[in-house]
Image: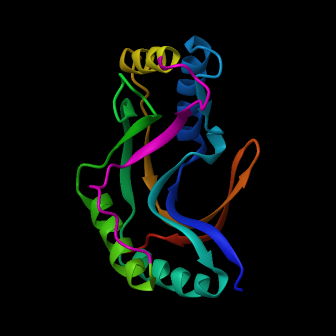
């Protein structure tokens, strides 16, 4: 049986943006009930374009080739953090996130290009609308609804909103290895965005 790796396609964040998100996490963590949220390691925060799941290693080269082709046809993107929120909402939060704003539509175009190139390899197109975000934490498995609700209230009232801008200049093929203390991410490919 072929060896499988858990892979996804993402935009990695510069250190300056990770620092802003880390500060937001630290403030939320300080004021949240203990164990209400499992916070993501700030160094692993990324903007997911497509989650592939378990991928046979013999497909890796084809995926990398297609991502490189997409990147050659895509110019760098100006992206900003825009507020905090929760999925499905702040009354019943399961995921705490920082919003992403890219007003030109180029981020959606990039995501659609990834879907169009990767779906024929056996990775179906996502049915839900694209909702770009940066996951900061997930509700703790053993947290009470009241504690999780308090986290949602903190997120809804967080002031001032975290603010950062950056130029996304590459897309990455990432490996996710699930460990007892959280996922470990390894970049397998950085495909520079080079179109004029």
Q: Magenta segment, principal secondary structure?
A: loop
Up-down relation of residue 130 to residue 22 (above or below):
below
Q: In the rendering, at what x and y percent does residue 82 appear?
A: 35, 35
Q: Please give left or right for residue 146 compared with residue 27 in the image.
A: left
Residue drawn at (65%, 44%) of the image:
43
Would residue 163 be visible to someone looking at this image?
Answer: yes
Q: Is residue 131 magenta?
A: yes
Q: Which stretch is magenta?
A: 123-145
Residue drawn at point x = 62 percent, y = 27 percent: 142
* Residue drawn at x 42%, y 78% as measured from the top left: 118
Q: Specify whether residue 157 is painted magenta.
A: no
42 on left or right of 123 = right
Residue 194 image offset from top left, x and y in percent: 43, 73
Q: Closer to the camera, 6 or 23? A: 6
The location of residue 67, given as percent across then percent down, is: 47, 77
For the C terminus, the quadrant is bottom left
Q: Is residue 178 left or right of residue 32?
A: right
Q: Quadrant of residue 143?
A: top right
Residue 193 sits in quarter:
bottom left
């Amino acid at each position: 049986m072929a060896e499988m790796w858990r892979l996804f396609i993402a935009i990695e964040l510069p250190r300056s943006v990770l620092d802003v998100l880390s500060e937001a996490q630290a403030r939320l963590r300080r004021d949240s009930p203990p164990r209400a949220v499992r916070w993501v390691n700030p160094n692993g925060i990324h903007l997911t374009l497509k989650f592939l799941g378990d991928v046979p290693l013999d497909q890796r080269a084809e995926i990398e080739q297609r991502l490189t082709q997409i990147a050659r046809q895509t110019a760098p993107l100006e992206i900003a953090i825009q507020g905090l929120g929760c999925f499905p909402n702040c009354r019943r939060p399961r995921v705490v996130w920082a919003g992403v704003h890219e007003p030109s539509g180029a981020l959606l175009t990039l995501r659609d290009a990834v879907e169009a190139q990767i779906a024929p390899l056996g990775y179906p197109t996502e049915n839900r609308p694209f909702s770009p975000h940066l996951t900061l934490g997930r509700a703790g498995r053993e947290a009470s609804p009241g504690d999780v609700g308090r986290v949602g209230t903190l997120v809804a009232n967080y002031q001032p909103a975290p603010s950062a801008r950056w130029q996304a200049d590459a897309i990455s093929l990432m490996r996710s290895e699930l460990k007892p203390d959280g996922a470990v991410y390894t970049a397998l490919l950085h495909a520079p965005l080079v179109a004029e």
